[in-house]
Amino acid sequence: MAIINQATKELQLKIVYYGPAMGGKTTNLVQVHDHIQTPAGHKGKLVSLATSSDRTLFFDFLPIESMTIKGFKTKFQLYTVPGQVVYNTTRQLVLRGVDGIVFVADSQYEKMPENVEAFQNLCDNLKQLKLDLGEIPYVLQYNKRDLPNAAPVAYLDFLLNRREVQVPSFAGTAHKGEGVFEALNMVTRLLLQKYLHQEVSPSV
Ligand SMILES: Nc1nc2c(ncn2[C@@H]2O[C@H](COP(=O)(O)OP(=O)(O)O)[C@@H](O)[C@H]2O)c(=O)[nH]1
Ligand SMILES: [Mg+2]
């Protein structure tokens, strides 16, 4: 749920990168952080909470400031979740208050069970938070397209993009920056559309 601060005229939106372990979520955030164009001083620091043995133990966080809508300065906060099943509590915590989602799938054939499981886990965790994926803007990124064992996009769509009206999906090679801003720009566009059509009401 967007955080609206009437006093500072800020609209804060939370975007969570979700997906199986090692699919490329952190790589997406690193690329965004490295290449995003923002006015000087408006790019937050990329914070990683991780241990030396497992860089996806906790989460990564990147705040970005964007345009002004209806007099409100919009701020996006980008988070990743840990992929490993044992960290489901952390995933639920990170999902709390989510506004938009980039689901990063691993295109490799052998990762399909993990992709499907992560997507199901996303739906389950949202349900626990009394949220419904049908009401949250999200996009899919089919990452690791550069690998020889990448499954066809149509197959990934068949497995993961099953809504009556398909959501936008993007081919990604995140470590080269491909498909990273395409996915982020689309989810932010969907979010801004949603809030432009909603009356911004005071909640803070
Ligand atoms: N070949 C290839 N490797 C990638 C791609 N994106 C990320 N990686 C690598 O995959 C590994 C896991 O990425 P990471 O971002 O840590 O995954 P996370 O667990 O989802 O956060 C790292 O070694 C990345 O460099 C990609 O598009 N292609
Ligand atoms: Mg990670």
Image (cartoon, rainbow, N blue to C red):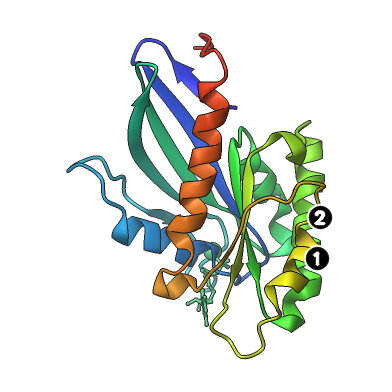
**Could you say where residue 70 lies in the image, as x and y percent from the top left?**
39, 17
Q: Residue at x 39, y 33 (%)?
A: 75
Question: Against 88, is 2 above or below?
Answer: above
Q: From where the camera sits, is residue 90 visible? A: yes
Report the disc number at residue 158.
1
Report the disc number at residue 147.
none
**Could you say where residue 127 lies in the image, as x and y percent from the top left?**
81, 38
Whether the residues at callouts 1 and 2 have beta carbons within 8 Å, the answer is yes
Q: On the picture, is 10 further left or further right than 132? A: left
Question: Tag 1: Cα neighbours inside 10 Å, few (<14), some, or many (≥20)?
Answer: few
Q: Residue at x 45, y 69 (%)?
A: 178
Mark 1 Cβ and ligand 1 under 8 Å apart: no
Question: Tag 2: Cα neighbours inside 10 Å, few (<14), some, or many (≥20)?
Answer: few
Question: Looking at this view, is 165 or 58 the one in front?
Answer: 165
Q: CA distance from mark 1 to mark 2?
A: 6 Å
Q: On the picture, is 86 further left or further right than 201? A: right
Q: Residue at x 50, y 23 (%)?
A: 196
Disc 2 target residue: 162
Tell me which corner region of the image, top left, top right, bottom left or bottom right, holds residue 58: bottom right
Q: Residue at x 81, y 65 (%)?
A: 159
- The kind of residue tagged 1 is Phe
Q: Secondary structure at mark 1?
A: helix
- The kind of residue tagged 2 is Arg
**Could you say where residue 76 lies in the image, as x and y percent from the top left?**
43, 38
Q: Secondary structure at mark 2?
A: loop
Question: Looking at this view, is 128 or 19 the one in front?
Answer: 19
